[in-house]
Image (cartoon, helix red, strand yellow):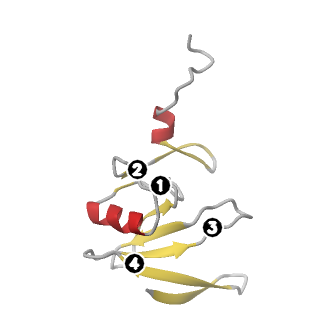
Amino acid sequence: MRKLFLAFEDNSLQEAKFLDVPRTTLFARYDPGNTSSSTQDHLHLFSRNRNELYAINRDGSPHDGSKAQLSGKEIKFLTSLGFSVPASGILESYTIGPFVSYKFSQLLEEDEPRDNEE
């Protein structure tokens, strides 16, 4: 694990933890959850050229509207850290309005009929 400090515009520093994803060329940055912004613990995954591929919350939902097809190695890595992952390995979100994101699996697993259904 590598540790770096990230500097923000407000002159604050935050420790960032970077982890290599075993047997891949990927690495991840762990961000702890924040109760004031209602975010969960999450990971941002990057390629070696530092392009962000996706971000995933601890419960397996997409973070920041991410979309990705997770490889078996990525799934193994995420679950070893205590993250849940979608059974399909597909990380996808649907944005209904500004800053409102829902997992497709939640939309598809709806048991109760909608108001306009009988």
Kindly report the distance in space between the C-alpha atoms of the residues bearing marks 1 and 4: 22 Å
The residue closer to the viewer here, 107 or 87, is 87
Chain-order first, disc 2 or disc 3:
3
Image position of 1 with respect to 106: above or below = below
Q: Secondary structure at mark 2?
A: loop
Q: Residue under circle 1?
A: 60
Answer with the quarter of the image where residue 16 lies: bottom right
User: Residue 39 falls in which quadrant of the image?
Assistant: bottom right
Residue 50's label in the rendered image is 4
Q: Is residue 63 left or right of residue 67?
A: right
Asked which secondary structure carries label 1, the reply is loop
* Label 4 secondary element: loop
Displayed quadrant of residue 2: bottom left
Q: CA distance from mark 2 to mark 3?
A: 20 Å
Residue under the point 50% across and 39% down? 106
In this figure, which residue is indicated by the disc labeled 3? 33
| Kind of residue indicated by mark 1 | Gly
Q: Where is 91 relative to 24, above or below?
A: above
Q: Residues within 10 Å of mark 4 (few under 14, many from 20)?
A: few
Type of the residue with mark 3: Gly
Q: Identify the residue at image location x=39%, y=68%.
A: 80
Real-space CA distance between mark 4 and mark 2, rounded to the nearest whole angstrom: 25 Å
Which of the two discs, 1 and 2, labels the residue nearer the N terminus? 1
- Amino acid carrying label 4: it is Arg
Single out the mark in the foreground, 3 or 4.
3
